[in-house]
Amino acid sequence: MANEAAIREAFRTQAHFCTVMDAPVTAGVCSALADALNRESRTGAAVLDWPGHPIADALPLRLVGGLNALAQRGHAALVRVFSGRERDPAAVGAILADALAKHDTAILPWLDGPPQTNEAGRAGALMTGLLHVAARFGQPFELLEIGSSAGINLLIDRFAFDLGGVRAGPQDSLVRIAPEWRGNPPPDAEVRFVSVRGVDVQPIDVADREAGRRLASYVWAEAHERVDRLARAIAMILEKPVALEAGDAADWVEARLAEPQAEGVTRVLVHSVVWQYLGDARRGRIAAAMARAGAAASFEHPLAWVRMEPNRDLARHEVLVTMWPGGGETRMVALAHAHGAWIEGL
């Protein structure tokens, strides 16, 4: 259990992350909360007495999401903060403290689960990894995603990509993923899909308007392009639903890996910014299941693991690829912005 000083420092750390990722408004909110939090509300007390690891649990972003939701519903003072019109730290802190006191009941439930930052931009990092796999095996993919949230990145077969000049996907797509590219481009390989499926412990149904608003609340206030992209992705799911089911990630991976694999199809497990939420037991089970399946893989039935996950020690997001057969060694093929604004090929 973290102490109060560590909790407040976690908000300052998140403010630093936001500043590095060009989100000054959200950084200001996090920084102000570090000082403004108190135990006069149930929400404030729950935050300051948080039993887990505040950064790994994304505690600051849980609270910011709840406050941003109030702003999006028209709470005048919070609108000034989240629009960036009010930047004075003392004034921002006072507004946030007042909101926590007056809207305690509405904000408290936002602490119950991790932020559902179902960011379409991260599909660019995953596709970067998939291009490396496609270049190796030259086969269509059976794609399996864990932590799919609302299933936005299950649209990876329907998004248009431009990754350092390498194009993939239908170029007339409603959503185009074209991050600023740095470094070496990925392989220019053909990417095809035979199926795309995902699982989440608590899937979000974007047909529910309130659920869509909740997703938008987790998007940082200054990221207008991300809000628009989310709306377009939701429209694509409403037009043609994705294959998303509720379940435990480890159970699901074990079950999917046990299914027969078609010859000439590469089975790929993908995920982005979900590993930290699974806990040691689930992570161990998934890694063990992949190692077992990898040991049995062949060039007729290849296996790959593509993930974009944060390296907290180095404060960066890494795109990692593991392929079987071939030793099952993990390669870092790129670094990426947390929300996909840029990708650096390695």
Image (cartoon, rainbow, N blue to C red):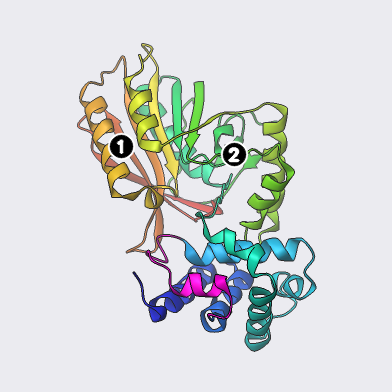
What secondary structure characterizes most of the magenta part? Answer: loop
Position of residue 8 in the picture relative to residue 97 (left or right): left
Whole-number angstrom distance, CA of label 1 to CA of label 2:
22 Å
Q: Amino acid at mark 2?
A: Ile
Compared with residue 284, is residue 7 higher up or lower down, i.e. above or below? below
Q: Is residue 60 visible?
A: yes
Res 24 → quadrant: bottom right
The image shows residue 53 at horizontal and vertical percentages of 37, 65
Res 295 → quadrant: top left
Q: How many marks?
A: 2
Q: Is residue 192 visible?
A: no
Say which mark, if any, is on residue 13: none
The image shows residue 262 at horizontal and vertical percentages of 38, 12
- Badge 2 density bin: few <14, some 14–19, many ≥20, Cα 10 Å: many
First-in-chain label (1 vs 2):
2
Disc 2 marks which residue? 152
Look at the image and say whether residue 317 sits in the magenta stretch.
Answer: no
**Which residue sits furthest bottom?**
90
Disc 1 marks which residue? 286
- Tell me where the magenta segment starts and ends, as one range: 39-57
Compared with residue 75, is residue 319 higher up or lower down, i.e. above or below? above
- Badge 1 density bin: few <14, some 14–19, many ≥20, Cα 10 Å: some
The image shows residue 312 at horizontal and vertical percentages of 36, 62
Compared with residue 72, is residue 261 higher up or lower down, i.e. above or below? above
Which structural element holds mark 1? Answer: helix
Viewer-proximal residue, 67 or 319?
A: 67
**Which residue sits furthest top?**
263
The image shows residue 186 at horizontal and vertical percentages of 44, 39
Residue at 57 percent of width and 81 percent of height: 40
